[in-house]
Every structure is written in structure tokens, then in C-alpha cells.
Amino acid sequence: MKINKHIIILVFIGFALSQNPFIPGEKLNYSAGFRFFSAGLASIEMHNDTLNGVPVYQLISKTRSAGILDKFYKVRDEIDVWVSSDDFRLIRMNKKIREGKYKRDFNAIIDWDKQEATMGKKILPLPNHVMDPISAIYYFRTKDMKIGDVYSFTSFDNGKIKDIQVTVTHEETISVPAGIFRCWVLSPSSPDGSELLKNQGEMTIWYTKDEKKLPAKIEQTTSLGSMILELKEVVLPLLEEPADVIEHHKNK
């Protein structure tokens, strides 16, 4: 009996999505806006990979300017991180930042047997478990959220260690290019009350209140203005077209 290969693919994807809120190969595309104008595009994607024979996730974040902004302030950022597929613990990070005239490359390799990060010639002792901001986004997709939940983790980014506290503050229905979603609203902060981001910065993340827990919107507000990422589409592996994203009226 001949079986349609497309049916096999769809069954496989359906099974994978039933086990996890995400599937390796998934790509999230965002529109990026700064203050009151469109600033560019951003994406986050996940892949299966191996490091030293151990299965891991590779997470890739790309941001690029577009339109008027691209003419006088070109942005071409790419961040690649490799994390444990069990607990999203950071294992390796490569950052290539290109923003206007500013250029920076940052690379780190973490040895969890020694609990230290190697950054070129510099070695930094680490606590038992650290994540970077991108792996933290996926980590929270695995959580069964409810209002009032508070999560804590240690962030490692650009060679700096910082304790982060994340609170599920409320529910909210939002509209983004991908559709209308009922969302959990998460607010990261510093446990000691210090500034989380530069320039009096604050961050808010909206996760869809469904089985996929998509990060539908990410807003970073500082004294200089607001940068907002809004989900445009979800692209799944092995499919030629973007996955359908529907209005989630049942969760309102």
C-alpha cells in the first residue's frame, strides 16, 4: 500500500507538537518597531544539534533593520546559542553584533564539570545553572503558567551574571500581525530592585494562552523609547507554507 509522504509528515509534526509546545526546526518571524515607526525584522529559530556527541538545541536569533532606519543606522545582529535539551542550561554562545558603526563579537564556551565559562583568555566561575535571554524565552514555553507565578533564574549574557525574577502578572488579549491571542503577560525584574536593563529599562513578554505558548509580543521600554517585536508568522519544518495562526477566541 502506498502512503502519501505528506500525510506522514503531518502526522509526525502533530505528534511532536502534542509532546512539546515547540518542535525543532520551528522559526518565529517578527516585525520590529522602535518608538512610532517600523524598524526592521527579527526571527528566532530552534534546531537539533550535537556538541561533543551530546544532543543539544541550537537557538538562532537574527535582527536586521529595514526601511528608512536601514539607510542611516544599519543593524545586522546574529546570536547563536547551544543549550541542554533537558533544562535549557547554556553550553555555548556566539554573538555577532553589527549596529551602525558599533561592532562586537562575543564567544563563550561553558564547561559544566568545572562550572566555568571560557571567553577567549578570560575564565568566569558560574553558579549551577545559567541561561541566556533567548534560551529563557523557550524555557518559559515549557511552564504551566497561572497569574501570580514567580520564576527565578540566573542569566549569563555578554560575560555578566545576573539574577532574574519573572512574574506572571495578568492575562491580556492582544492583536499582532499573526492574529489575535489571549496571552499570559510576564514581567522580568531584578530581585534586589536594581535596574534590569540600561536606561531605566523594563521588559514585558506576552505568551499565548494555549498549548504552543508562543512568545507573541516582546516589548522593551527604556528612557530612550520602546522596541517592540510582534509575531508575524510561525514556520514549521518540512512544510512549504507558514503554519496557520488562528484567533484564539476559546481562551478569552
Image (cartoon, rainbow, N blue to C red):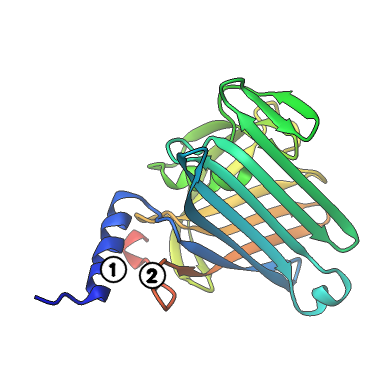
Mark 2, secondary structure of its residue? loop
Q: In this view, does 135 lie above or below 230?
A: above
Furthest toward the left, the residue is 1
Q: How far apart are marks 2 and 1 (CA)?
A: 7 Å
Whole-percent x, y for residue 54 in the image: 46, 38
Look at label 1 and name its amino acid: Ile
Question: Residue 157 sits in which quadrant?
Answer: top right
Mark 1, secondary structure of its residue? helix
| Neighbours of disc 2 within 10 Å: few (<14), some (14-19), many (20+) | few
The residue located at (47%, 68%) in the rendering is 234
Whole-percent x, y for residue 122 in the image: 79, 29
Q: Quadrant of the C terminus?
A: bottom left
Left or right, residue 130 beside residue 143? right
Look at label 2 and name its amino acid: Leu
Whole-percent x, y for residue 113 in the image: 56, 21
Q: Mark 2 points at which residue?
A: 238
The residue located at (78%, 35%) in the rendering is 120
Point out the tag, 2 or 1, that comes first from the N-terminus: 1
Question: Residue 43 sits in which quadrant?
Answer: bottom right
Mark linked to residue 109: none
The residue located at (57%, 31%) in the rendering is 153
Mark linked to residue 9: 1
Q: In this view, does 37 lie above or below 163?
A: below
| Neighbours of disc 1 within 10 Å: few (<14), some (14-19), many (20+) | some
Contact? badges 2 and 1 (CB < 8 Å): yes
